[in-house]
Image (tube, rainbow, N blue to C red):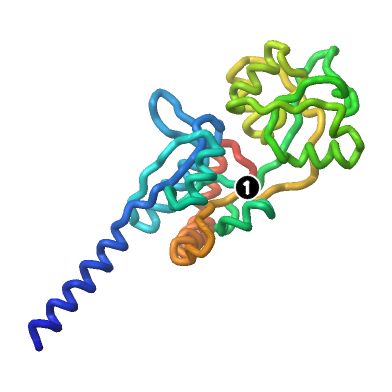
């Protein structure tokens, strides 16, 4: 009986250690600077540094996996990923995912080239081409002002491609978060200006599959500690990302 108890205890300890030592599979986008992107063969960005800080605090292992964003969302939904980093917390996504406390807010922005031929208002884009995300707040705005059928929105494969299209005149405007747009414009050495920006700030955080309460709790504990000790602020300043 004593031997059975010892074996049982050993099995329990082994299972606990195995669960604790599991490396979380973390998904991120391939081209979303300054948040998530590759540089000289390394995976870098604001969201990447936040992830490093969180897992260092938790003393847990993780593995980063880069895909286009639609694949990240799908793989998380079907359990092939444990976490997606830097996901906007929207009503539709909350049907499938649970979200950590947000660690910054994202503002969607409509950029045009800063020159005299660029339109001065959203209405000036009637009949023009825009490159941007599906289901953005801009589309809702166009619906509100009755222009949703008068402006054509195309989706580029990446934010970098969208900004390149703007630079060479393939589109007249691009939709993307302000920090992303300014970063890419600087990389391309072009001048852009904001044509329209909503007052809506969308919270961004880690996403896990709905019901994964244990992992979500760990992420929130780490984020609270990093907020309190100033580490998140240091990362925000490093990447020029606005405070929550």
The residue lying at 89 percent from left, 42 percent from top is 144
Badge 1 crowding class, 10 Å Cα cut-off, few under 14, some 14 to 19, many 20 or more, is many
At 50% from the left and 47% from the top, the residue drawn is 84
Residue indicated by mark 1: 88
Q: Nearer the viewer, residue 144 or 200?
A: 144
Looking at the image, which is closer to me, 201 or 74? 74
Depth check, front residue: 52 or 236: 52
Q: Is residue 31 above or below residue 199?
A: above
Question: Can residue 214 be seen from the camera position used here?
Answer: yes
Quadrant in the picture for residue 161: top right
Residue 238 visible in the picture:
no
Q: Position of residue 56 (x, y in %)?
A: 37, 52
Q: In this view, does 216 lie to the left or right of 128?
A: left
Residue drawn at x 14%, y 83% as measured from the top left:
5
Quarter of the image where one finds residue 16:
bottom left
Image coordinates for residue 130, horizontal then vertical, percent: 75, 24
């Amino acid at each position: 009986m004593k031997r059975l108890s010892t074996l049982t205890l050993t099995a329990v300890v082994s299972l606990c250690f195995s669960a604790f030592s599991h490396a979380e599979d973390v998904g991120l986008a391939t081209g979303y600077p300054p948040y998530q992107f590759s540089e000289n063969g390394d995976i870098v960005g604001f969201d990447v540094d936040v992830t490093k800080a969180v897992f260092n605090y938790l003393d847990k292992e993780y593995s980063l996996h880069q895909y286009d964003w639609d694949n990240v969302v799908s793989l998380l939904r079907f359990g092939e990923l444990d976490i997606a980093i830097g996901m906007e917390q929207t009503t539709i996504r909350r049907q499938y995912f649970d979200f950590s406390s947000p660690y910054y807010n994202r503002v969607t922005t409509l950029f045009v080239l800063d020159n005299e031929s660029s339109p001065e208002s959203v209405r000036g884009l009637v009949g023009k081409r825009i490159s941007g995300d599906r289901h953005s707040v801009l589309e809702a705005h166009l619906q509100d002002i009755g222009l949703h059928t008068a402006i054509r929105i195309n989706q580029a494969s990446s934010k970098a491609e969208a900004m390149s299209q703007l630079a060479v005149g393939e589109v007249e405007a691009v939709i993307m978060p302000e920090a992303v747009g300014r970063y890419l414009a600087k990389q391309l050495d072009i001048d852009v200006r904001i044509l329209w920006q909503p007052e809506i700030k969308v919270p961004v955080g880690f996403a896990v599959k709905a019901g994964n309460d244990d992992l979500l709790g760990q992420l929130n504990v780490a984020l609270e500690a990093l907020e309190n000790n100033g580490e998140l602020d240091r990362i925000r300043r490093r990447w020029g990302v606005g405070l929550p």
